Amino acid sequence: MPKNTLLIVPKKRLDELDEAYALAKTAGYEIVSLITTRYHKPNIIKEGKLKEIKKEVEGKNIETIIFYNEFTPVTYYKLYKIARVELLDKPLLILNIFSRHAGSKEAKLQIELAKIRHEIPIVREFVRRQKLGELPGFLGPGKYAIDEYLALLRRREHQIKLKLEELKKRKKSELLRRKNLGLPHIVITGYTCAGKTTLFNSLVSENKRTGEEYFTTISPKAKGALLHDSFKVIFSDTVGFIRGIPPYIIEAFYATLQEVVFSDLIILVVDASEPIRTINEKLQESLSILDKIGAISIPLFIVLNKIDLIASDELSKALDVVNSIRVEHNNIVDILPMSALRSSDIDTLRRRLWSFFQNTRKSMFTD
Ligand code: GDP
Ligand code: MG
Protein backbone atom coordinates (compact mmCIF):
# COMPACT_ATOMS: atom_id res chain seq x y z
CA MET A 1 0.00 0.00 0.00
CA PRO A 2 1.45 3.37 -1.00
CA LYS A 3 1.77 5.75 1.93
CA ASN A 4 -0.23 8.99 2.13
CA THR A 5 2.41 11.58 1.52
CA LEU A 6 2.77 15.33 1.80
CA LEU A 7 5.30 16.78 -0.61
CA ILE A 8 7.01 20.04 0.34
CA VAL A 9 8.74 21.74 -2.57
CA PRO A 10 10.66 25.01 -2.49
CA LYS A 11 9.38 27.35 -5.21
CA LYS A 12 12.68 27.33 -7.04
CA ARG A 13 12.38 23.59 -7.56
CA LEU A 14 8.89 23.65 -9.01
CA ASP A 15 10.27 22.76 -12.46
CA GLU A 16 11.38 19.44 -10.94
CA LEU A 17 7.88 18.55 -9.82
CA ASP A 18 7.39 15.72 -12.34
CA GLU A 19 10.62 14.14 -11.24
CA ALA A 20 9.65 14.48 -7.57
CA TYR A 21 6.33 12.71 -8.19
CA ALA A 22 8.03 9.98 -10.23
CA LEU A 23 10.69 9.33 -7.61
CA ALA A 24 8.10 9.28 -4.81
CA LYS A 25 5.98 6.79 -6.74
CA THR A 26 8.96 4.55 -7.44
CA ALA A 27 9.73 4.48 -3.72
CA GLY A 28 6.13 3.58 -2.81
CA TYR A 29 4.72 6.93 -1.71
CA GLU A 30 1.52 8.48 -2.96
CA ILE A 31 1.49 12.26 -2.94
CA VAL A 32 -1.90 13.44 -1.75
CA SER A 33 -0.91 16.94 -0.79
CA LEU A 34 1.55 19.58 -1.97
CA ILE A 35 2.91 22.59 -0.11
CA THR A 36 5.42 25.02 -1.57
CA THR A 37 7.96 26.98 0.45
CA ARG A 38 9.61 30.23 -0.41
CA TYR A 39 12.09 30.72 -3.20
CA HIS A 40 15.03 32.05 -1.20
CA LYS A 41 16.70 30.08 1.59
CA PRO A 42 14.63 27.00 0.72
CA ASN A 43 16.06 25.03 3.63
CA ILE A 44 14.35 27.19 6.21
CA ILE A 45 10.68 26.60 6.99
CA LYS A 46 9.04 29.49 8.82
CA GLU A 47 6.56 29.26 11.70
CA GLY A 48 3.51 30.12 9.59
CA LYS A 49 4.41 27.42 7.10
CA LEU A 50 4.97 24.91 9.90
CA LYS A 51 1.42 25.54 11.11
CA GLU A 52 0.11 24.95 7.59
CA ILE A 53 2.05 21.68 7.42
CA LYS A 54 0.77 20.52 10.81
CA LYS A 55 -2.82 21.20 9.77
CA GLU A 56 -2.36 19.31 6.53
CA VAL A 57 -0.75 16.32 8.27
CA GLU A 58 -3.62 16.03 10.72
CA GLY A 59 -6.39 16.74 8.22
CA LYS A 60 -5.25 14.33 5.53
CA ASN A 61 -3.93 11.46 7.54
CA ILE A 62 -0.41 12.00 6.27
CA GLU A 63 2.03 9.15 6.98
CA THR A 64 5.11 10.59 5.33
CA ILE A 65 6.50 14.03 4.59
CA ILE A 66 8.90 14.38 1.68
CA PHE A 67 10.86 17.63 1.69
CA TYR A 68 12.19 17.98 -1.87
CA ASN A 69 15.39 19.65 -0.77
CA GLU A 70 17.95 18.88 1.91
CA PHE A 71 17.16 18.92 5.62
CA THR A 72 19.24 21.11 7.82
CA PRO A 73 19.31 19.60 11.32
CA VAL A 74 17.12 22.46 12.53
CA THR A 75 14.51 22.00 9.79
CA TYR A 76 14.34 18.32 10.56
CA TYR A 77 13.95 19.03 14.28
CA LYS A 78 11.15 21.53 13.66
CA LEU A 79 9.24 19.15 11.43
CA TYR A 80 9.71 16.38 13.98
CA LYS A 81 8.24 18.60 16.69
CA ILE A 82 5.03 19.31 14.76
CA ALA A 83 4.47 16.00 12.96
CA ARG A 84 5.53 12.59 14.28
CA VAL A 85 5.49 10.95 10.87
CA GLU A 86 8.18 9.53 8.59
CA LEU A 87 10.38 12.41 7.41
CA LEU A 88 12.36 12.21 4.19
CA ASP A 89 14.29 14.74 2.20
CA LYS A 90 15.48 14.33 -1.39
CA PRO A 91 18.73 12.48 -0.52
CA LEU A 92 16.85 10.03 1.74
CA LEU A 93 14.20 9.47 -0.93
CA ILE A 94 16.90 8.69 -3.48
CA LEU A 95 18.70 6.35 -1.06
CA ASN A 96 15.37 4.62 -0.53
CA ILE A 97 15.18 3.93 -4.27
CA PHE A 98 18.80 2.80 -4.37
CA SER A 99 17.96 0.22 -1.68
CA ARG A 100 15.38 -1.35 -3.96
CA HIS A 101 17.95 -1.84 -6.68
CA ALA A 102 21.03 -2.67 -4.67
CA GLY A 103 22.10 -6.25 -5.25
CA SER A 104 25.72 -6.27 -4.22
CA LYS A 105 26.96 -6.17 -0.67
CA GLU A 106 29.06 -3.13 -1.51
CA ALA A 107 26.06 -1.16 -2.75
CA LYS A 108 24.08 -2.03 0.38
CA LEU A 109 26.93 -0.90 2.62
CA GLN A 110 27.45 2.33 0.66
CA ILE A 111 23.75 3.11 1.05
CA GLU A 112 23.85 2.46 4.79
CA LEU A 113 26.95 4.63 5.09
CA ALA A 114 25.28 7.50 3.25
CA LYS A 115 22.21 7.20 5.51
CA ILE A 116 24.39 7.33 8.63
CA ARG A 117 26.22 10.40 7.30
CA HIS A 118 22.87 12.02 6.67
CA GLU A 119 21.67 11.15 10.15
CA ILE A 120 24.66 12.14 12.29
CA PRO A 121 24.24 15.95 12.09
CA ILE A 122 20.52 15.58 12.79
CA VAL A 123 21.11 13.43 15.86
CA ARG A 124 23.69 15.96 17.04
CA GLU A 125 21.01 18.63 16.87
CA PHE A 126 18.76 16.43 19.03
CA VAL A 127 21.59 16.00 21.55
CA ARG A 128 21.98 19.78 21.68
CA ARG A 129 18.25 20.34 22.18
CA GLN A 130 18.14 17.66 24.84
CA LYS A 131 20.93 19.38 26.75
CA LEU A 132 19.00 22.63 26.51
CA GLY A 133 16.11 20.79 28.15
CA GLU A 134 13.87 21.08 25.09
CA LEU A 135 13.57 17.37 24.55
CA PRO A 136 13.06 15.51 27.80
CA GLY A 137 12.81 11.77 27.41
CA PHE A 138 13.43 11.58 23.71
CA LEU A 139 14.26 8.06 22.50
CA GLY A 140 13.30 6.25 25.65
CA PRO A 141 13.85 6.89 29.34
CA GLY A 142 17.65 7.20 29.64
CA LYS A 143 18.95 10.71 29.85
CA TYR A 144 21.88 9.79 27.64
CA ALA A 145 19.94 7.75 25.12
CA ILE A 146 20.66 10.10 22.24
CA ASP A 147 24.35 10.36 23.14
CA GLU A 148 24.52 6.58 23.07
CA TYR A 149 22.72 6.46 19.78
CA LEU A 150 25.20 8.92 18.31
CA ALA A 151 28.11 6.80 19.52
CA LEU A 152 26.45 3.75 17.99
CA LEU A 153 26.13 5.48 14.62
CA ARG A 154 29.81 6.46 14.67
CA ARG A 155 30.88 2.90 15.51
CA ARG A 156 28.74 1.57 12.67
CA GLU A 157 30.20 4.15 10.27
CA HIS A 158 33.68 2.97 11.17
CA GLN A 159 32.77 -0.72 10.75
CA ILE A 160 31.26 -0.11 7.32
CA LYS A 161 34.35 1.72 6.11
CA LEU A 162 36.50 -1.24 7.11
CA LYS A 163 34.19 -3.71 5.39
CA LEU A 164 34.16 -1.65 2.22
CA GLU A 165 37.93 -1.61 2.08
CA GLU A 166 37.96 -5.37 2.44
CA LEU A 167 35.35 -5.78 -0.30
CA LYS A 168 37.33 -3.64 -2.74
CA LYS A 169 40.10 -6.22 -2.65
CA ARG A 170 37.67 -8.99 -3.55
CA LYS A 171 35.88 -7.22 -6.40
CA LYS A 172 37.65 -9.03 -9.17
CA SER A 173 36.38 -12.45 -8.20
CA GLU A 174 32.83 -11.13 -8.15
CA LEU A 175 33.22 -9.92 -11.72
CA LEU A 176 34.34 -13.37 -12.82
CA ARG A 177 31.49 -15.10 -11.05
CA ARG A 178 28.96 -12.94 -12.83
CA LYS A 179 30.44 -13.56 -16.21
CA ASN A 180 30.17 -17.25 -15.49
CA LEU A 181 26.40 -17.08 -15.45
CA GLY A 182 26.93 -17.50 -19.16
CA LEU A 183 24.00 -15.44 -20.43
CA PRO A 184 24.36 -12.04 -22.08
CA HIS A 185 23.35 -9.34 -19.65
CA ILE A 186 21.57 -6.22 -20.92
CA VAL A 187 21.04 -3.31 -18.54
CA ILE A 188 18.47 -0.60 -19.15
CA THR A 189 19.49 2.81 -17.97
CA GLY A 190 18.65 6.48 -18.52
CA TYR A 191 17.14 9.34 -16.56
CA THR A 192 14.06 9.16 -14.33
CA CYS A 193 10.83 9.07 -16.36
CA ALA A 194 12.55 8.16 -19.65
CA GLY A 195 10.54 4.93 -19.76
CA LYS A 196 13.04 2.35 -18.45
CA THR A 197 10.57 0.37 -16.36
CA THR A 198 7.93 0.42 -19.10
CA LEU A 199 10.47 -0.94 -21.56
CA PHE A 200 11.80 -3.51 -19.11
CA ASN A 201 8.32 -4.82 -18.31
CA SER A 202 7.47 -5.21 -22.00
CA LEU A 203 10.72 -6.97 -22.76
CA VAL A 204 10.38 -9.53 -19.99
CA SER A 205 6.60 -9.91 -19.74
CA GLU A 206 6.09 -12.83 -22.10
CA ASN A 207 8.79 -14.88 -20.52
CA LYS A 208 7.62 -16.87 -17.57
CA ARG A 209 9.77 -19.84 -18.36
CA THR A 210 13.00 -18.51 -16.93
CA GLY A 211 13.98 -19.10 -13.31
CA GLU A 212 13.74 -15.60 -11.93
CA GLU A 213 15.24 -16.30 -8.50
CA TYR A 214 18.43 -17.23 -10.22
CA PHE A 215 18.88 -13.79 -11.74
CA THR A 216 18.20 -11.81 -8.60
CA THR A 217 21.75 -12.59 -7.53
CA ILE A 218 22.78 -10.10 -10.20
CA SER A 219 20.27 -7.47 -9.15
CA PRO A 220 16.84 -7.50 -7.49
CA LYS A 221 15.49 -6.07 -10.76
CA ALA A 222 16.98 -8.61 -13.15
CA LYS A 223 14.90 -11.03 -15.21
CA GLY A 224 15.61 -13.53 -17.93
CA ALA A 225 13.87 -13.31 -21.30
CA LEU A 226 14.05 -14.77 -24.76
CA LEU A 227 15.18 -12.44 -27.52
CA HIS A 228 14.75 -14.89 -30.34
CA ASP A 229 13.89 -18.60 -30.48
CA SER A 230 16.01 -20.07 -27.73
CA PHE A 231 18.37 -17.16 -27.35
CA LYS A 232 18.08 -16.14 -23.72
CA VAL A 233 19.38 -12.95 -22.14
CA ILE A 234 19.12 -11.24 -18.76
CA PHE A 235 17.57 -7.76 -18.60
CA SER A 236 18.05 -5.42 -15.62
CA ASP A 237 15.99 -2.35 -14.87
CA THR A 238 18.55 -0.08 -13.22
CA VAL A 239 18.06 2.77 -10.80
CA GLY A 240 19.00 5.09 -13.63
CA PHE A 241 20.30 8.61 -13.44
CA ILE A 242 18.87 11.29 -11.21
CA ARG A 243 19.67 14.98 -11.42
CA GLY A 244 21.14 16.81 -8.42
CA ILE A 245 22.54 13.91 -6.43
CA PRO A 246 24.32 15.36 -3.39
CA PRO A 247 28.05 14.54 -3.17
CA TYR A 248 27.84 12.45 -0.02
CA ILE A 249 25.57 9.90 -1.67
CA ILE A 250 27.45 9.72 -4.95
CA GLU A 251 29.47 6.66 -3.86
CA ALA A 252 26.24 4.84 -3.06
CA PHE A 253 24.90 5.89 -6.47
CA TYR A 254 27.91 4.51 -8.31
CA ALA A 255 27.85 1.30 -6.28
CA THR A 256 24.17 0.80 -7.09
CA LEU A 257 25.01 1.21 -10.77
CA GLN A 258 27.70 -1.43 -10.57
CA GLU A 259 25.69 -4.01 -12.50
CA VAL A 260 26.06 -1.65 -15.47
CA VAL A 261 29.82 -2.20 -15.36
CA PHE A 262 29.35 -5.98 -15.50
CA SER A 263 26.94 -5.92 -18.43
CA ASP A 264 27.43 -6.93 -22.06
CA LEU A 265 25.19 -4.26 -23.53
CA ILE A 266 23.72 -1.05 -22.17
CA ILE A 267 20.38 0.29 -23.39
CA LEU A 268 20.29 4.02 -22.78
CA VAL A 269 16.69 5.23 -22.81
CA VAL A 270 16.29 8.86 -23.81
CA ASP A 271 12.99 10.74 -23.53
CA ALA A 272 12.74 12.20 -27.03
CA SER A 273 9.71 14.30 -26.08
CA GLU A 274 11.80 16.63 -23.92
CA PRO A 275 13.21 19.92 -25.25
CA ILE A 276 16.18 19.37 -27.51
CA ARG A 277 18.52 21.15 -25.09
CA THR A 278 17.50 18.80 -22.28
CA ILE A 279 18.02 15.78 -24.53
CA ASN A 280 21.51 16.96 -25.36
CA GLU A 281 22.43 17.75 -21.73
CA LYS A 282 21.11 14.45 -20.43
CA LEU A 283 22.89 12.48 -23.14
CA GLN A 284 26.21 14.18 -22.39
CA GLU A 285 25.73 13.68 -18.67
CA SER A 286 24.77 10.01 -19.13
CA LEU A 287 27.94 9.37 -21.10
CA SER A 288 29.98 11.13 -18.48
CA ILE A 289 28.46 8.97 -15.71
CA LEU A 290 29.13 5.82 -17.74
CA ASP A 291 32.71 7.00 -18.09
CA LYS A 292 33.05 7.62 -14.34
CA ILE A 293 31.81 4.18 -13.37
CA GLY A 294 34.07 2.50 -15.92
CA ALA A 295 31.35 1.45 -18.40
CA ILE A 296 32.17 3.70 -21.33
CA SER A 297 33.67 0.94 -23.45
CA ILE A 298 30.62 -1.33 -23.14
CA PRO A 299 28.46 -1.37 -26.31
CA LEU A 300 25.71 1.21 -26.02
CA PHE A 301 22.28 0.93 -27.66
CA ILE A 302 20.37 4.20 -27.68
CA VAL A 303 16.58 4.10 -27.53
CA LEU A 304 14.91 7.39 -28.44
CA ASN A 305 11.70 6.76 -26.58
CA LYS A 306 8.24 8.38 -26.57
CA ILE A 307 8.28 9.29 -30.25
CA ASP A 308 4.49 8.91 -30.23
CA LEU A 309 4.47 12.30 -28.49
CA ILE A 310 6.48 14.26 -31.03
CA ALA A 311 6.30 15.51 -34.62
CA SER A 312 8.68 14.19 -37.26
CA ASP A 313 10.76 17.39 -37.41
CA GLU A 314 11.34 17.17 -33.66
CA LEU A 315 12.42 13.58 -34.07
CA SER A 316 14.93 14.47 -36.75
CA LYS A 317 16.42 17.14 -34.47
CA ALA A 318 16.75 14.58 -31.69
CA LEU A 319 18.37 12.15 -34.13
CA ASP A 320 20.83 14.85 -35.20
CA VAL A 321 21.90 15.29 -31.59
CA VAL A 322 22.43 11.57 -31.08
CA ASN A 323 24.26 11.19 -34.37
CA SER A 324 26.63 14.03 -33.60
CA ILE A 325 27.44 12.41 -30.26
CA ARG A 326 27.94 9.08 -31.99
CA VAL A 327 30.83 10.54 -33.98
CA GLU A 328 32.85 10.87 -30.78
CA HIS A 329 31.66 7.65 -29.16
CA ASN A 330 32.34 4.57 -31.18
CA ASN A 331 30.79 2.34 -28.50
CA ILE A 332 27.32 3.46 -29.68
CA VAL A 333 26.25 0.41 -31.68
CA ASP A 334 22.69 1.30 -32.61
CA ILE A 335 20.00 3.98 -32.32
CA LEU A 336 16.30 3.16 -32.34
CA PRO A 337 13.49 5.74 -32.29
CA MET A 338 10.47 4.02 -30.76
CA SER A 339 7.62 4.06 -28.30
CA ALA A 340 7.81 1.66 -25.39
CA LEU A 341 4.01 1.61 -25.41
CA ARG A 342 3.80 0.01 -28.87
CA SER A 343 4.32 -3.72 -28.97
CA SER A 344 5.42 -3.63 -32.63
CA ASP A 345 8.28 -1.34 -31.58
CA ILE A 346 9.21 -3.72 -28.77
CA ASP A 347 9.43 -6.49 -31.37
CA THR A 348 11.71 -4.32 -33.51
CA LEU A 349 13.89 -3.66 -30.48
CA ARG A 350 14.15 -7.40 -29.76
CA ARG A 351 15.21 -8.04 -33.36
CA ARG A 352 17.84 -5.31 -33.30
CA LEU A 353 19.24 -6.56 -29.98
CA TRP A 354 19.32 -10.08 -31.34
CA SER A 355 21.18 -8.97 -34.43
CA PHE A 356 23.69 -7.09 -32.27
CA PHE A 357 24.55 -10.33 -30.48
CA GLN A 358 24.58 -12.20 -33.81
CA ASN A 359 27.09 -9.76 -35.20
CA THR A 360 29.41 -9.65 -32.23
CA ARG A 361 29.34 -13.39 -31.71
CA LYS A 362 31.40 -13.20 -28.58
CA SER A 363 32.84 -16.60 -27.85
CA MET A 364 31.30 -16.76 -24.38
CA PHE A 365 27.78 -16.66 -25.79
CA THR A 366 28.10 -19.43 -28.28
CA ASP A 367 27.02 -22.82 -27.04
P1 GDP B 1 11.43 5.27 -15.69
O1 GDP B 1 11.48 6.28 -14.57
O2 GDP B 1 12.53 5.53 -16.68
O3 GDP B 1 11.39 3.85 -15.22
O4 GDP B 1 10.08 5.60 -16.50
P2 GDP B 1 8.71 4.79 -16.54
O5 GDP B 1 8.84 3.53 -17.30
O6 GDP B 1 8.17 4.69 -15.16
O7 GDP B 1 7.84 5.78 -17.43
C1 GDP B 1 7.58 7.13 -17.04
C2 GDP B 1 6.27 7.57 -17.67
O8 GDP B 1 6.42 7.65 -19.09
C3 GDP B 1 5.12 6.61 -17.43
O9 GDP B 1 3.96 7.36 -17.21
C4 GDP B 1 5.01 5.81 -18.75
O10 GDP B 1 3.72 5.34 -18.99
C5 GDP B 1 5.41 6.87 -19.76
N1 GDP B 1 6.00 6.30 -20.97
C6 GDP B 1 6.98 5.39 -21.09
N2 GDP B 1 7.27 5.11 -22.39
C7 GDP B 1 6.44 5.90 -23.13
C8 GDP B 1 6.25 6.08 -24.53
O11 GDP B 1 6.90 5.49 -25.40
N3 GDP B 1 5.29 6.99 -24.91
C9 GDP B 1 4.55 7.68 -24.00
N4 GDP B 1 3.64 8.54 -24.46
N5 GDP B 1 4.70 7.52 -22.67
C10 GDP B 1 5.64 6.65 -22.23
MG1 MG C 1 11.60 3.07 -13.33
Image (tube, helix red, strand yellow):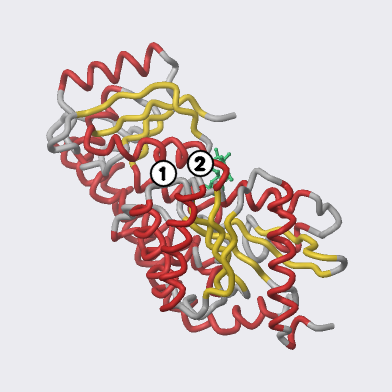
| Cα separation between marks 1 and 2 | 7 Å
* Mark 1 vs 2, N-terminal side: 2
Q: How many marks?
A: 2
Q: Amino acid at mark 1?
A: Leu
Image height of 364 relative to 71, above or below: below
Look at the numbered discs 1 and 2 and tell me whether their residues touch, using CB distance below 8 Å. yes
Quarter-of-image position of residue 130: top left
Nearer to us in this view, 94 or 185: 185
Residue 314 screen position, x and y as percent: 45, 50
Residue located farthest toward the top when viewing the structure as drawn: 59
Label 1 CB-ligand 1 distance < 8 A? no
Residue at 23% across, 39% down: 126
Q: Give the side of residue 272 with respect to residue 246, left or right.
A: right
Q: Residue furthest front?
A: 313
Q: Is residue 154 left or right of residue 268?
A: left
> How far across and down, in percent of the image, does residue 135 sit?
22, 30
Quadrant that contains the N terminus? top right
Residue designated by label 1: 93
User: Label 1 crowding class (10 Å Cα cut-off): few <14, some 14-19, many 20+?
Assistant: many
Residue at the spot of label 2 = 27
Depth order, front residue of 11/114: 11
Tell me the amino acid under the disc marked 2.
Ala
